[in-house]
Image (cartoon, rainbow, N blue to C red):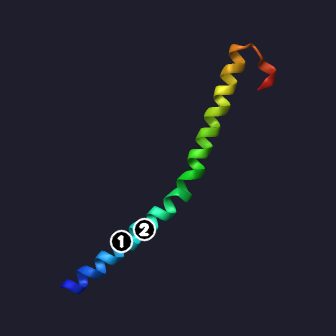
Amino acid sequence: MGHTFEKFKQIVIIASLSLLIVSPLIFHPIITAKSEERNVYNKALLALEELDYVSC
């Protein structure tokens, strides 16, 4: 019983660490794209307020 539980515990720890390592690689491009999208939108709003339509 104890050996099986230890093996399961090791598998869970390895899977958890793998997710911690891989998750930034997955989420970083998504967060960067959303941030860039928000920046472009804010620039467009500023240009609209300044009536500078050509800059966008």
Q: Kindly state the secondary structure of the residue where label 2 is placed.
A: helix
Q: Position of residue 15 (x, y in %)?
A: 40, 70
Q: Position of residue 41 (x, y in %)?
A: 64, 29
Identified at 57% across, 52% down, the residue is 28
Q: Which mark is residue 17?
A: 2
Which quarter of the figure has residue 26? bottom right
Amino acid type at circle 2 is: Leu
Looking at this rendering, what residue extends furthest in the right direction?
54
Looking at this rendering, what residue extends furthest in the left direction?
1
Q: Which residue is mark 1?
A: 13
Q: Is residue 25 above or below residue 6?
A: above
Identified at 20% across, 84% down, the residue is 2
Which quarter of the figure has residue 20? bottom left
Q: Is residue 40 above or below residue 13?
A: above
Say whether marks 1 and 2 touch (CB < 8 Å).
Answer: yes
Q: Residues within 10 Å of mark 2 (few under 14, many from 20)?
A: few
Q: Is residue 1 above or below residue 38?
A: below
Count of numbered circles in the view: 2
Q: Kindly state the secondary structure of the residue where label 1 is placed.
A: helix
